[in-house]
Image (spheres, grey):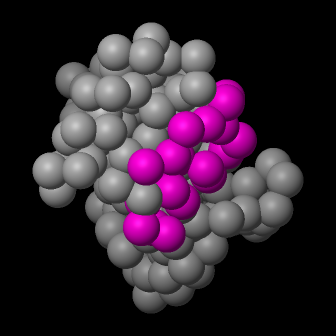
C-alpha cells in the first residue's frame, strides 16, 4: 500500500508495476485510508478515485509511440497522402489524384504506418490527428461531398 502526495507522471501506473496493491493520497480522510488498508489486507486492489484519471494518462503515455518534439517527420508527399487517406480515398484514387502509381502509394503508406507506429489506415489518421500532424480541417467537406468526389 502506498501513500503519496501529488504523484508525478508515470507514478500511478508504475506503482502497480512494482507490486503496490493500493494507492492513496496522503491528504485523504483517515477513514478512507483505513478502508483502503482493509481492502488491500484482504487481497483486493485499491486506487483512490481522484487518481483514476492519472492512471489512464499514464497508460496512454505508455502505449503511445514516442516521437520527437512536433511528432514524426513526414515528407510533403506523405502528408499529402495522409490528407487524402483521411478523406476516405482508396489507393487507386490517391494514385490518380497525385499522378503516381498505386505501388508508390502503398510504399508511402508503409512508411507512414511505420513512422506513426500503427498498422492500419484508420490508425494512421487517428494517430496523425492526436499528434497534430493532421487537423480536422484536412478532413475536408461533408461525407456526401467526399463520396461525390471519390466516385468522379
Q: Which image quarter is the C terminus in?
A: top left
On screen, 45 above or below 149?
Answer: below
Q: Nearer the viewer, residue 96 or 141?
A: 141
Residue 65, quarter of the rendered image: bottom right
Picture coordinates of residue 100 (x, y %)? 55, 75
On the question of residue 36 being in view, the answer is yes
Q: Is residue 128 left or right of residue 16?
A: right
Name the residue located 43 percent from the left edge and 16 percent from the top edge.
30
On screen, 38 above or below 137?
Answer: below
On the question of residue 125 being in view, the answer is no
Picture coordinates of residue 139 (x, y %)? 46, 32
On screen, 3 above or below 18?
Answer: above
Residue 13 belongs to the span the image colors magenta: yes
> How many discs appear?
0
Residue lying at the far right of the rendered structure? 69
Q: Which residues are magenta?
A: 1-19
Picture coordinates of residue 47 (x, y %)? 35, 37
Q: Nearer the viewer, residue 126 or 137?
A: 126
Q: Nearer the viewer, residue 29 or 70?
A: 29
Name the residue located 39 percent from the left edge and 26 percent from the top edge.
33
Residue 39 belongs to the span the image colors magenta: no
Picture coordinates of residue 109 (x, y %)? 49, 74
Residue 20, quarter of the rendered image: bottom left
Name the residue located 49 percent from the left edge and 82 percent from the top edge.
110
Q: Nearer the viewer, residue 88 or 102?
A: 88
On screen, 46 above or below 111?
Answer: above
Name the residue located 67 percent from the left edge and 44 percent from the top edge.
9
Q: Is residue 114 left or right of residue 75?
A: left
Amino acid at each position: 500500500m502506498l501513500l503519496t502526495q501529488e504523484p508525478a507522471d508515470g507514478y500511478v501506473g508504475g506503482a502497480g508495476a512494482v507490486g503496490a496493491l493500493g494507492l492513496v493520497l496522503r491528504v485523504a480522510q483517515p477513514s478512507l485510508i483505513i478502508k483502503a488498508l482493509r481492502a488491500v489486507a484482504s487481497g483486493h486492489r485499491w486506487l483512490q478515485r481522484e487518481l483514476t484519471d492519472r492512471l489512464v494518462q499514464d497508460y496512454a503515455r505508455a502505449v503511445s509511440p514516442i516521437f520527437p518534439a512536433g511528432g514524426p517527420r513526414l515528407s510533403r508527399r506523405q502528408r499529402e497522402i495522409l490528407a487524402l487517406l483521411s478523406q476516405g480515398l482508396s489507393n487507386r484514387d490517391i494514385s490518380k489524384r497525385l499522378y503516381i502509381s498505386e505501388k508508390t502509394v502503398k510504399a508511402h503508406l508503409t512508411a507512414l504506418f511505420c513512422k506513426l507506429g500503427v498498422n492500419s489506415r484508420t490508425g494512421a489518421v487517428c494517430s496523425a490527428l492526436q499528434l497534430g500532424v493532421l487537423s480536422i480541417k484536412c478532413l475536408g467537406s461533408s461525407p456526401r461531398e467526399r463520396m461525390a468526389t471519390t466516385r468522379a
